[in-house]
Amino acid sequence: MSNSKLRPETIAAHALRAVDAATGAVVPPIYLSSTYARDENYLPKLKENYVRNGNPTLWQTEEAIAALEQGEAAMLFASGMAAITTLTETIPQGAHVVAPDVMYYGTRDWLKRLEALGRISLTLFDPRKNGALAASLQKGKTDFVWIETPLNPTWDVIDIEAAAKAAHDAGAILAVDATATGAVTTQPLKFGADIVFHSATKYLNGHSDVLAGVLVTREQNQRWKDVAVLRTKMGAPLPPMECWMLMRGLRTLFVRYRQASANAMAIARHFEKHPKVERVLYPGLASHPNHDVAARQMTDGFGGMMSILVRGGFDEARRLCTKLKVIVPATSLGGVESLAEHRKTVEGPTSPVPDNLVRLSVGIEHVDDLIADLEQALNAL
Ligand SMILES: Cc1ncc(COP(=O)(O)O)c(C=O)c1O
């Protein structure tokens, strides 16, 4: 179904198939069974007969996401981190890995851990420096390039096409953490990436009630087959209940993402010149350092993720989060409700994130309520 001619909005709204062939149910059934009986010849009825190896609810959700990302196949995991840690198991012992220095800190910490254990050698590049990614590559030695775009929490945008070309010239694959694009505004595989990753906990589910991760591949090559074996052996697939809930969230993906994008753009414009704000980091603003790349690569809005650099420092930014009355002071992103987070508090003192950065995950509320809430909180500082 990944070659489906249906438009992405339709794929999402129907979770690929609106009507269950066996029963006519408009909402797909959930197969909670952990095991499946064999037939009269003692042959399995399905391609898998144990839940950890695969099941119908998992497959339907994976097919829908693969179609949205225009990949050959998708694999769902019990969390975003489960997907990432399983994928990095495919990196050969001692190989070289390249990744940005600012990115989701959980991934950075994991790569640093692999480096400390002697599993990989690691180069972290500055995504704001032109040519820094290409200069980090070691031809024949670099196996794996990981980028995130837009980057959490500075929302810098990396040129996927240029990154893919550089990675491939060095003999490496390019994997893209596209969590913030929600599979709506950028399809990294179209730009030459080999694997796309989402923390499906975020936009794909969109209701802050599921923990999930997904990988989508351009082609089902040996590495992909290895990931499938590892997912089963490491016991990391997403359970059926979560798959079903994720599918339910997916049905409203496009309306949610587009509303969040529109709200975020309005907030970014409103606060860009605010006296209590040093800077708004949002790829949709012309003032954003990679706005040109964003405009080319993000073809359906700039998303709901942004950060505000509050005038003052650590204390003012942290205090802002406590003054909000509508926006919830909580971690995570991509849900229907707006969230604010002081990243330095969460990531700790070694984090490269500015002390005065407050990350906003803009939801789908009325934008005037969000603007008024931020105004009153900034004025209360
Ligand atoms: C950009 C990004 N990548 C990966 C992850 C990890 O995903 P999960 O929390 O689903 O394990 C997160 C979680 O916040 C994230 O924001």
Image: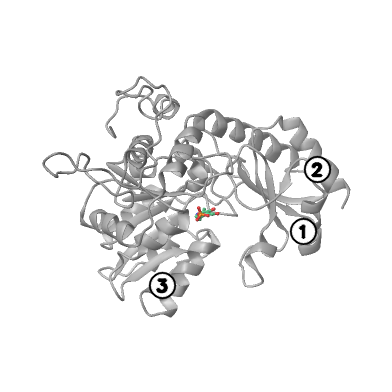
Instruction: Check the image and report above or below for 95 versus 369.
Output: below
Q: Which residue is mark 3?
A: 122
Q: Which mark is residue 318?
A: 1
**Residue 216 image offset from top left, x and y in percent:** 34, 46
Crowding at label 1, few (<14), some or many (≥20) Cα neighbours within 10 Å? many
Which of the marked residues, 2 or 3, is nearer the chain's N terminus? 3
Q: From where the camera sits, is residue 117 visible?
A: yes
Mark toward the viewer: 3 or 1: 1
Secondary structure of residue under mark 1: helix
Which of the marked residues, 1 or 2, is nearer the chain's N terminus? 1
Mark toward the viewer: 2 or 3: 2
Q: Name the residue at the left extreme.
A: 41
Q: Gap between marks 1 and 2, in whole Å? A: 15 Å
Nearest to the observer: residue 342 or residue 100: 342
Quadrant of the image for the N terminus? Answer: top left
Q: Are marks 2 and 3 in contact (CB under 8 Å)?
A: no
- The amino acid at mark 2 is Lys
Which of the marked residues, 3 or 1, is nearer the chain's N terminus? 3
Nearest to the observer: residue 30 or residue 178: 30
Q: Are marks 3 and 1 in contact (CB under 8 Å)?
A: no
Q: Which mark is residue 325?
A: 2
